[in-house]
Image: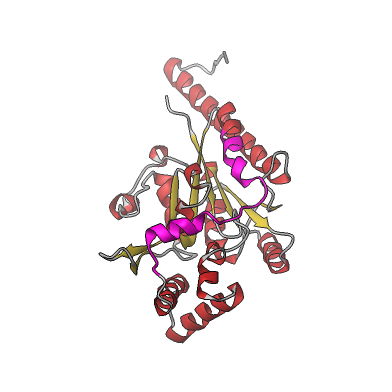
Amino acid sequence: MDKPIIALMYDFDNTLSVKNMQDYSFIPSLGYDSNTFWQKCNEFKDKYAMDQILAYMYFMVDEAKKRNIRITEENLNEMGKNIMFFKGVESWFDRVNKYGDAKGFDIKHYIISSGLKEIIAGSKIYKCFDQVYAARFLYGENGEAIWPAVSINYTQKTQYIYRINKGVESETDDKNLNEHMDESEKKVPFNRMIYFGDGMTDVPSMKSVKLGGGYSIAIYNDEDEKNMYTVDKLMEYNRCDFACRSDYSLGSPLEKVVFTIIDKISSEYAYGELKNEYAKAESGNGQLVFDIE
């Protein structure tokens, strides 16, 4: 019998990685600093009333063409090798998997990001995820990016939470995503989900998971005052259950929080199984007698 699943779902930039993935290699290749590049993306977005993610993807392609820089899947993969992660991230997944296994659960890890899947795919931790949902490009015959194939903004992130919930993990399968499904048939109930994010763009996802009975954790970098202020607001407005420093290392407060949530999920699951067993016993003999073995 398959073990029940607990899904851990992560934003990527500033949640697992120390800064935006484009900041490591792509932006320097254009001759920009990070602040200037993102400011120009925002100005472009406002000028043409564009979706924020579509705007930055277009701006990447346009600025690269002006400098004769090829954006290919292979080049973006290569950029992923330079991403730096917060303390403990690279050993985090194995530790959580082992803890969940000891509790009788299959831990699955998912990325839901507005960043680029091609860059994430080149990173050291890509192999740790069961699925990565992120923006990505369509490539022409010469292998260069020509159009956004997938764009994921902050509200669209919630779509992927429902895909995980129902087990409809293919990005192109909208039919089964929107079909009715009994709660008992869903792959990962909301009360066995944990969402990790760092900012206001994670609010719809945090709220969806919490409303469904799951858990949301705000990750903060105490070296980033703007991020600290944002996380304070997330806690103030009850968007998350916990706010934890961006330290994923052995024995960290974040590890303690996640392990305690897994303990809680385990206890609630055991209670539900016991209730079901009791109901079956009662319906079988008509007596309110049930011996726990």
Q: Is residue 144 above or below residue 242?
A: below
Q: Is residue 112 above or below residue 40?
A: above
Magenta stretch? Answer: 70-97
Q: Residue at x 61, y 75 (%)?
A: 35
Counting from the top left corner in percent of width and height, residue 67 is at 43, 77
Quadrant of the rendering where the C terminus is positioned: top right
Q: Is residue 38 above or below residue 235?
A: below
Q: Please state if 75 lies on the left or on the right of 238 as rendered.
A: left
Q: Please state if 206 lies on the left or on the right of 114 as rendered.
A: right
Counting from the top left corner in percent of width and height, residue 230 is at 67, 66
Residue 124 in sight in this render: yes
Is 62 contained in the magenta span? no
| Residue closest to the eye, 158 or 33 | 33
Quadrant of the rendering where the N terminus is positioned: top left
Check the image and name the residue furthest to the bottom.
Answer: 47
Residue 134 in sight in this render: no
Counting from the top left corner in percent of width and height, residue 181 is at 35, 45
Counting from the top left corner in percent of width and height, residue 292 is at 57, 15
- Residue 274, by quadrant, is top right
| Residue closest to the eye, 9 or 145 | 145
Q: Residue at x 47, y 29 (%)?
A: 3
By secondary structure, the bulk of the magenta-drawn segment is best described as helix
Is 95 contained in the magenta span? yes
Check the image and name the residue furthest to the front.
Answer: 68
Q: Residue at x 55, y 56 (%)?
A: 82
| Residue closest to the eye, 94 or 194 | 94
- Residue 257, by quadrant, is top right
